[in-house]
Image: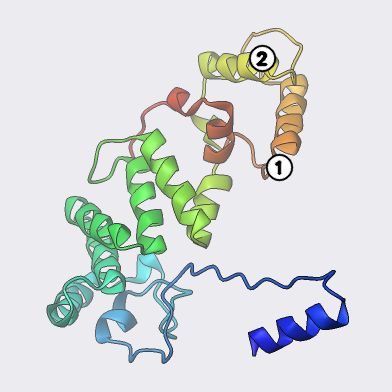
């Protein structure tokens, strides 16, 4: 069908239009949607590829999900979606070391949602050493694979709530180096600094959400984020 359409367009346009067929495979692809397991019903994230409603992270019944996901994996130990579901279950249970290991396995098999969750674990320092560079790299990779959760993690959280004068000075200095700011390097992130940041967002085609991971990465300032712990 594609070849016939392309041939017809080429003929009708006398060769001036040359159709191309581009496919981006950003998730699991099935000729027939698989039958969901109990693991899927108990631990799949919303917007999954198996047609179930999905469960919000806070609503995961990990006591039921962990054994059911382990059982499902017995038949296919390297199934990326089921590894991710088990990782989510352990994550919800607070078993962060195990969750990170499972997210790693699923991510290495190309599962974008697992790569996104693994990035968040690195950002928050849960089950692994806090590493903003690695976490952001993983989130960027997951976003390129179509993960909406990775996009949210990169562009919606303003890390300036953690900043003091010294961090704001670094932001001002970098904005000045890039030609967006001409004021004093005083750490007072007032209207002039905010306007400079807005100009940087526009020039970089970034979402204007403050000093997000995407913005700090673009400025080369991920290292100024102070260490923190989630309560």
Question: Residue 133: x and y, percent?
Answer: 40, 34
Number of the label disc, if any, that sits on residue 173: none
Question: Residue 12: x and y, percent?
Answer: 87, 82
Q: Residues within 10 Å of mark 1 (few under 14, many from 20)?
A: few
Left or right side of 139 for 70: left
Task: Look at 34% across and 35% down and name the residue there.
Answer: 131
218 vs 211, nearest the viewer: 218
**Residue 231 is at least partly visible in this image:** no
Left or right side of 145 for 97: left
When asked about the image quadrant of residue 94, the answer is bottom left
**Residue 80 is at least partly visible in this image:** yes
User: Which color scheme is applied?
Assistant: rainbow
Q: Looking at the image, is mark 1 or mark 2 earlier in the sequence? A: 2
Identify the element where label 1 is drawn: loop
Q: Tell me the residue that label 2 is attached to.
A: 177
When asked about the image quadrant of residue 9, the answer is bottom right
Left or right side of 174 for 8: right
Q: Tell me the residue that label 1 is attached to.
A: 205
């Amino acid at each position: 069908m594609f070849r016939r359409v392309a041939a017809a367009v080429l003929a009708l346009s006398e060769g001036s239009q040359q159709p191309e067929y581009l496919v981006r495979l950003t998730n699991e692809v099935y000729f027939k949607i698989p039958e969901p397991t109990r693991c899927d019903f108990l631990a799949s994230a919303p917007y999954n590829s198996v047609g179930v409603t999905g469960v919000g992270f806070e609503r995961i019944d990990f006591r039921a999900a962990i054994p059911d996901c382990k059982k499902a994996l017995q038949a296919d130990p390297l199934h990326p979606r089921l590894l991710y579901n088990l990782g989510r279950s352990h994550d919800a249970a607070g078993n962060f070391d195990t969750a990170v290991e499972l997210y790693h396995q699923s991510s290495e098999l190309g599962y974008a949602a697992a790569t996104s969750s693994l990035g968040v674990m690195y950002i928050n320092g849960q089950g692994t050493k806090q590493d903003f560079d690695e976490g952001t790299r993983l989130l960027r990779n997951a976003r390129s694979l179509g993960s909406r959760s990775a996009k949210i993690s990169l562009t919606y959280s303003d890390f300036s709530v953690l900043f003091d004068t010294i961090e704001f000075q670094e932001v001002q200095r970098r904005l000045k180096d890039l030609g967006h700011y001409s004021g004093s390097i005083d750490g007072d992130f007032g209207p002039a600094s905010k306007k400079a940041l807005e100009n940087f967002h526009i020039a970089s085609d970034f979402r204007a959400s403050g000093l997000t991971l995407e913005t700090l990465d673009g400025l080369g300032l991920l290292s100024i984020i102070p260490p923190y712990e989630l309560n």
